[in-house]
Image (cartoon, rainbow, N blue to C red):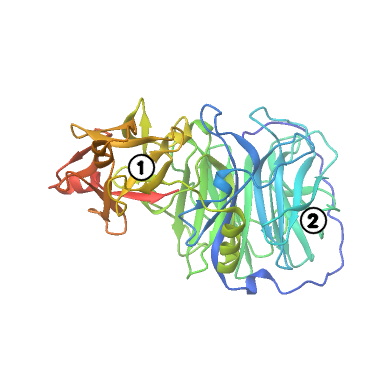
Amino acid sequence: MLSRRRLLTTAAAAAAAPLAFAVPASAQSNAAYAMAYFKESPNLTDDSYALHLAVSANGLQWTPLNQNQPVATPTAGMQGLRDPFLLRKRNGAFAVLATDLKGRVFNLDNQYIHVWDSADLRSFTGYRRVKLHDTATHSWAPTAFWDPSRSRYAVVYSAYNGTRDVLLVNYTADFVNMGAAQVFFDPGFNVLDGDVLVHDGAFYLAYKNMADGNLYVSRSTTGQPNTFTTLTSGLRQGSAIEAPILVKSYAGNTFWLWGDSFSPDNAVFYAWQSSNIAGNSWSALDQRGYTAPISSKHASIVPITEAERAALVTRWGAPQWNRLKSYNYPGRFVRHAGNVGRIDPFPMEPPADQQWRLRPGLADAAGVSFESVNYPGRYLRHVNYAVNLVANDGTAQFAQDATFHRTAGLADGAWASFTSHNHPTRYLRHSGFVLRIDPVSTAADRADATFQLTY
């Protein structure tokens, strides 16, 4: 989130005795991931300053839960949140932390954050606001990790220390008694949005450098305040980026660094991958390889088990709609605009223009018809080979024109292509970003006619 300036004093961390805990979650067999996020869209139509959840089997393709609607909403303070963070606690349960903010007018003097407890992310209990400090500054983007040397959780967040933006830390056993605030990371320039990943006994901190606008990864052997050394060159995709997330894949020695764009006008997630988190070898991932939930902003990601993923889908439900991502323009999705079918960059307004209910084909139940979510009863239909959004008039001709048959993707068999029901040698494709049905002969044609069904 955007940086602001206020005064914060530094205090010593509270001493603590070791605590007894159940088997750490790291000992479980993780095989999936959960994401927490809030939502913003360019024209505010899809803004939601509440807790949202998504799940993924591979950590890259995400399924929003509860129809991309909130699963919990703050009732105190600003009565809204930004920057939610999921922490797997030592006993296997979860804590949810979040910035106490609602909307796009930032409260600069807020010493509190939101906290929930959750056994399994299927319900949220013990909602409270907890105070982190007594000074006139903010408490933004809280994250947390377990500090074994203190037998406490470290809660790291963005604030102002009277000179510049730094990361502060409080140490807590229960997310109720938060201990005293102290400076966690101050490299001598303004920083924002810290996220710590513990791996092989070392502590890796990703942060945003406010001076150059890039993301960086640093390392400490102890995880103690002011012991981190930066490892990487600056990382950026898009025009601006913030909110880094460090994730280790449960499958092999793969690490991901996520970041989201600076503005809701360009609400896009970007990702890098590395096989060596201690090195300086992060490669940008092609957007074909990952899809974040619609309008999602400043997320966090935590590994979960396959049983937990399935239980979350059962509890909250998978979407009753899909999106179609373009193969050769993976930042664009099929949408309707002025009743014309086309592919446009994400984000777009209104976001529902890109959501489709995949109905059994109107002319052949083995096929598929694409019904608009925000204009129910209207379908993608070809007329003179151009594809438009048209209200179903109940005729046989309409049913045939609005029915397509899915095949393996012409440019990538793991994706999808769609033939016209009544013109089976023609495929749904984009040309000049506008949808139509055409014969396919060249590699460029095949790429134009390939889509990914996603959420």
Q: 394 or 279, which is in the foreground?
A: 394
Quarter-of-image position of residue 9:
top right
Q: Tag 2 or tag 1, which sits nearer the N-term?
A: 2
Quarter occupied by residue 437: top left
User: How dense is the environment of label 1, judged by Cα within 10 Å: few (below 14), some, or many (20 and up)?
Assistant: many
The residue at which mark 1 appears reads as 370
**Image position of 383 (left or right of 376):** left
From this viewpoint, is residue 1 visible?
A: no
**Percent position of residue 49, x then y:** 65, 37
Residue 285 picture location, percent across and down: 40, 52
Can you say which quadrant of the picture contains the N terminus?
Answer: top right
Q: Residue at x 83, y 36 (%)?
A: 135
* 449 versus 252 height, above or below: above
Amino acid under disc 2:
Tyr
Q: Count neighbours of disc 2 (C-alpha within 10 A) and say few if under 14, some if 14 to 19, many if 20 or more.
A: many
Note whether 196 is above or below 191 in the view shown: below
Nearer-the-camera pick, 392 or 180: 392
Q: Secondary structure at mark 2?
A: strand
Q: Nearer the viewer's eye, disc 1 or disc 2? A: 1
Where 304 sits versus 261, above or below? Answer: below
Which residue does the image show at 63% across and 49% down from the upper left? Answer: 194
Residue 342 in the image: x percent, y percent?
Answer: 31, 34
In-front residue for pair 138/81: 81
In the displayed orientation, state which residue is furthest to the left.
441
Work out whether residue 93 can be spotted.
yes
Q: Is residue 342 left or right of residue 225?
A: left
Disc 1, SS: strand
Say what amino acid the circle numbered 1 marks.
Answer: Phe
Q: Which residue is mark 2?
A: 171
